[in-house]
């Protein structure tokens, strides 16, 4: 199943946020895909929007509730999000105020929507990631769902970061576990930027350091393959030290790729998947944070330290897909990072390859 819903896409410039995020990215993928996927529902289709997915899975419209966020983030932070503190948390999460106190990529005079209105879109994306997981674990289903949005993986226990207000990946995983739909969850994060928030939250849950602890027998195991330098490993460490935040925590399988190390990317990822399997046993579901920003034609300056070719991006996704399929592990794929006018290409080519 493919989850695609144009109504939940954020047009960041509407809020005065100046990021090279193309609002038509998901639509371009759908428009280019083999028409049989959308017309007849051939694998990896059918294509459903959020409302259709809610109905098909028997979920309520308000599927992501405050309690789902409280399971993951600190009470003080959740209180801020659901009060007048929201504006300040959005300014922080999207880094709209630089360390020098001046606006950064932020032009509020050009906004046509209040910044706080972004929260509804963020919650809708979180719902999408959860629904992708719910769709992937339907017993007699395809055991595969690709959500053409979402991917907020940087938000930490008590703060947003890196364009992520809440950590929708961990919220989705914990909701599945709390509702008895999964016990062991893998997170395979191939976004160019380290999945720092997810690693921190999982570590805190294991150590009883804040978030609601895991239910008996439940666990999350994380793999992150990412740029060894830049954001967040260097830049967020600097910002975090200014703001008094704790240091970043490694994922269970941490694979930093140094600049120029693209030729070893696939083999290191394959080794990492085997290591994840040794650590985590067989999961009930794998959530793949399928960032396209390692692509050499990505349009974000901060992702330019990793430059995979289109072929390497597709090989990466096919490696993960086949690894999971051989082990009969259901998978929910979240599109995640990807910037500029060519960011649609890697997920499109992956989905098109699956359809052949
Ligand atoms: Zn990224």
Image: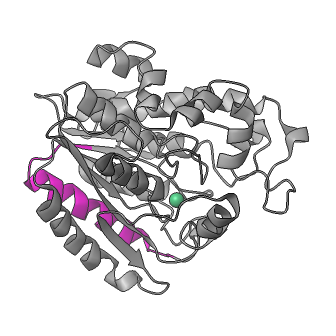
Residue lying furthest front: 208
Task: Give above or below for 114 relative to 271.
Answer: above
Q: Residue at x 56, y 59 (%)?
A: 342
Residue ranking furthest to the bottom: 260
Q: Main secondary structure of the magenta part?
A: helix
Instruction: Looking at the picture, tell me which residue is in the foreground, 263 or 244.
Output: 244
Q: Percent from the top left, x then y, of residue 96?
A: 76, 50
Lateral position of residue 34 relative to residue 12, left or right = left
Nearer-the-camera pick, 238 or 3 = 238
Tell whether 78 sits left or right of 47.
right
Residue toward you, 286 or 145 = 286
Residue at x-position 9% and y-position 47% = 328
In the picture, which quadrant includes the N terminus? top left
- Where in the figure is residue 355, as x and y percent of width and height? 26, 47
Queried whether the magenta region covers residue 321, the answer comes back as yes
Residue 351 in sight here: no
The answer to whether residue 57 is above or below residue 255 is above
- In the rendered image, residue 345 lying in the magenta stretch gets the answer no
Query: Is residue 44 something that shows in the picture?
Result: yes
Which residue lies at the image location 70% right of the left edge and 27% below the top edge? 117
Residue 93 drawn above or below residue 60: below
Q: Quadrant of residue 85?
A: top right
* x and y percentages locating residue 268 in the rendered image: 27, 77
Q: Left or right: where does residue 93 sit relative to residue 333?
A: right
Which stretch is magenta? 306-331
């Amino acid at each position: 199943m493919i989850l695609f819903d144009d109504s939940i896409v954020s047009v960041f410039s509407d809020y005065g946020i100046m990021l090279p995020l193309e609002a038509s990215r998901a639509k371009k993928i759908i428009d280019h895909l083999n028409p049989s996927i959308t017309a007849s529902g051939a694998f990896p289709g059918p294509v459903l929007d959020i409302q259709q997915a809610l109905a098909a899975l028997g979920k309520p419209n308000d599927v992501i509730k405050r309690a789902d966020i409280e399971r993951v983030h600190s009470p003080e932070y959740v209180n801020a999000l659901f009060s007048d503190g929201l504006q300040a948390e959005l300014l922080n999460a999207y880094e709209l105020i630089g360390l020098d106190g001046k606006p950064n990529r932020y032009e509020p005079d050009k906004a046509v929507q209040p910044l706080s209105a972004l929260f509804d879109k963020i919650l809708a994306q979180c719902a999408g990631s959860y629904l992708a997981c719910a769709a992937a674990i339907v017993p007699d289903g395809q055991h595969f769902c690709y959500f053409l949005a979402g991917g907020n993986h940087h938000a930490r226990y008590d703060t947003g970061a890196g364009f992520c207000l809440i950590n929708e990946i961990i919220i989705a995983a914990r909701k599945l576990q709390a509702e008895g739909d999964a016990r062991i969850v893998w997170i395979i994060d191939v976004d160019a930027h380290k999945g720092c928030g997810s690693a921190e939250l999982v570590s805190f849950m294991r150590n009883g350091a804040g978030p609601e602890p895991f239910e008996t027998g439940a666990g999350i195991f994380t793999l992150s393959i990412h740029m060894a330098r830049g954001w967040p490993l260097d830049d967020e460490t600097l910002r975090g030290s200014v703001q008094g935040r704790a240091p970043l925590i490694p994922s269970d399988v941490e694979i930093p790729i140094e600049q120029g190390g693209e030729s070893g990317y696939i083999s290191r990822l394959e080794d990492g998947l085997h290591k994840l399997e040794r650590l985590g046993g067989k999961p009930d579901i794998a959530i793949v944070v399928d960032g396209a920003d390692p692509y050499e034609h990505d349009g974000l300056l901060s992702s330019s330290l990793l430059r995979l070719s289109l072929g390497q991006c597709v090989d990466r996704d096919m490696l993960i897909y086949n690894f999971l399929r051989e082990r009969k592990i259901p998978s929910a794929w979240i599109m995640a990072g990807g910037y500029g006018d060519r960011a649609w290409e890697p997920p499109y080519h992956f989905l098109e390859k699956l359809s052949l």
